[in-house]
Amino acid sequence: MAREALGLIETRGFLSAVEAADAMCKAARVRLTRYEVVTDALVTVVVRGTVAEVEAAVAAGARAAQGVGELLRGHVIPAPDPEIEPAVLEPPGADPIL
């Protein structure tokens, strides 16, 4: 089974993150996997899909976030190691996948 790519957009502010997530889901066949809000209004949005789709989604999300607020970074991991997936994809405090 092929591993799915992981796409991340980090913004300052929830509005920028929502705009990025909307653009990512409209631009490509990706699944919005989760988002996380941390201190200083930093928000990370995570999507999954094929490498090409995730790359297109992250590019679209980055443009959208810049248009309404502050984009900090967009990044694509083509084939994340299974060891990092619970840490990245599980909500804080969730039981780790064994």
Image (cartoon, rainbow, N blue to C red):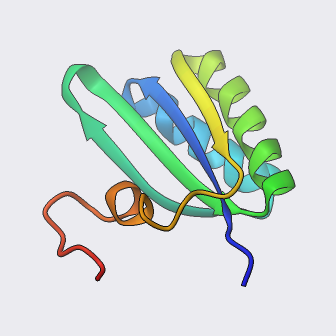
Relative placement, left or right, of 4 versus 95 is: right
Relative placement, left or right, of 43 versus 65 is: left
| Residue 59 horizontal/vertical position (percent) | 76, 33
| Residue 30 horizontal/vertical position (percent) | 70, 62
| Residue 49 horizontal/vertical position (percent) | 71, 64
Direction left: furthest residue: 93
Is 84 situated above or below 95? Answer: above
Give the quadrant of residue 61. Answer: top right
- Tell me what residue is drawn at x 52 percent, y 51 percent: 46
Q: Quadrant of the C terminus?
A: bottom left
* Total numbered labels placed on residues in the image: 0
- Tell me what residue is drawn at x 33 percent, y 27 percent: 42
Is 32 situated above or below 11? Answer: below
Q: Closest to the observer: 5 or 80? A: 80
- Tell me what residue is drawn at x 23 percent, y 73 percent: 96
Q: Closest to the observer: 71 or 4? A: 4
Relative placement, left or right, of 79 versus 47 is: right
Q: Closest to the observer: 87 or 54? A: 87
